[in-house]
Image (cartoon, grey):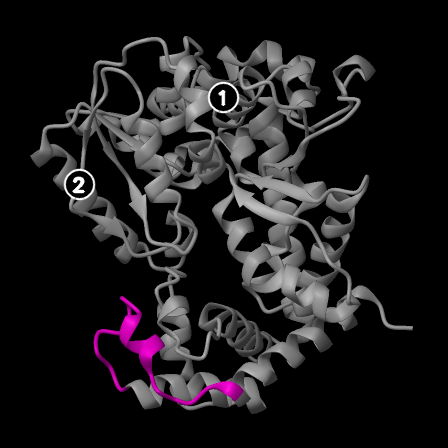
Amino acid sequence: MQGDGEKFIQAMDTRAAAMVEACTLCGDCVTACPMTNGNDKEALLGGILDMLRSGGGEGSDQWINACTASGKCIPACPEGLNMRFMQVAARMMMKRHQLGTETAKKTGAAGYRNMSRGVRVLSRLQLAPEDLARLGQGKAAPEDEPAESDFVFYIGCNVLKTPHIALLCLDVLDALGMQYRVMGGPATCCGVLQVAPGDVEGTGKLAFNTIRSLSAGGTTELLNWCPGCEKLFDDVVLPTYREATGEDTFGMSMFITYLAGRLDDLRPLLVHSVDKRVGLHEHAGANNVSEAAKQLLQAIPGLDFVELPVVQMASSCTNYVGRPELREQAHTELLEAAATAGVGTLAGVYHSCHRDLCSHEADWPFEMVNMMELIGEAMGISRPDLFKRFKAMNDVDAIIAESAELIARNGLNAADVRDEVASGILAG
């Protein structure tokens, strides 16, 4: 009997083979990609197809390694193929061949352990047990569990490193009168850390287990926060699960687009004037999050929204990993554009971007916030951004001393805290 990993591999191969067969080599996806710089369309696309056919493909790594998951290729394809999925499948195949199956598994497992420890330590460095439980980490009190829920709010994993963002999302949902279950954290990981080293089997095991966990109780609608989870679920995991099992799964919506869709209900709650000149840190993508974010910011009373002429050609700052020079260039262009526009606030959407950008606040004449902080301010709600505070402190011992009560309450190991503060907050 096949396990989840084997089913996932077979279904991935079936999907990829069907797309390779349907591809006409027109090259429209290459033309639309902001990372190809007008290079030979036939060679780049042909290399991807050869990789998916046989595991080879001269020059295929050029486009695979350049991809920042902007999603520009998806609407460009006249055949309706998902080149971003094909890129992921080819990248996983390439990495597995480079590392070998066992090394790929060990690398993926190590990445998952490191992420789990970082999420556990940094979230508990900032939140009391009752707030952790509210975010699905730890056991909630029976009276806090909704008898019925409108949807599952899936927060992913790494937003827990900047938990004030996730708590503000819950505050808004509560104000709208929504009933929901919160799920997320390493126990329901999407499998993304197994993707990078090419551990296809490990990705399938984690992802299929998470789908079943999220589906428990008859979930039909899932509200998602994390852009990385959204991309992996939409492009890879959910279609592959359906291919492997024949089962329908839940629908997914991004939190920001959902909130913009509820703007008529939200607007009466925005009762406080937020007298700030605000620019938005935008990312390319196929999920309309930037458009929804602008709608929400422009609905805040007193807020002067400024359109910045810079859009990051990646689905989030995470997709610059391994290309620090590209990320630095993109951030410099953004910060310079914000300064030229005379903004007093630069607002981001995603938690990964916030972790990157908040450290620049001391060097530029504007504050760096997550957009949920501005929505919260308009509603009279605030949550302290301890991650940014710790960044500004830039002192491991001072951070540990300030957090002594939460370290004790959450039973954290002192050595783990020191390591994670140094590597997960102060580094970079």
Residue 33 counted in the magenta span: yes
Q: Nearer the viewer, residue 171 or 388?
A: 171
Residue 308 - label: 2
**Residue 229 horizontal/vertical position (percent):** 56, 50
Residue bounds of the magenta highlight: 22-40
Judged left or right of residue 102, residue 331 is left
Q: Is residue 119 above or below residue 213?
A: above
Furthest toward the front, the residue is 264
Q: Nearer the viewer, residue 342 or 138?
A: 342
Q: Which residue is mark 1?
A: 168
Residue under the point 57% across and 66% down: 197
Q: Nearer the viewer, residue 129 or 341?
A: 341
Q: Is residue 333 above or below residue 349?
A: below
For residue 137, which quarter of the picture? Answer: top right
Q: Nearer the viewer, residue 418 or 4?
A: 4
**Residue 234 horizontal/vertical position (percent):** 56, 58
Residue under the point 37% across and 76% down: 63
Identify which amino acid the numbered label 2 is placed on: Leu
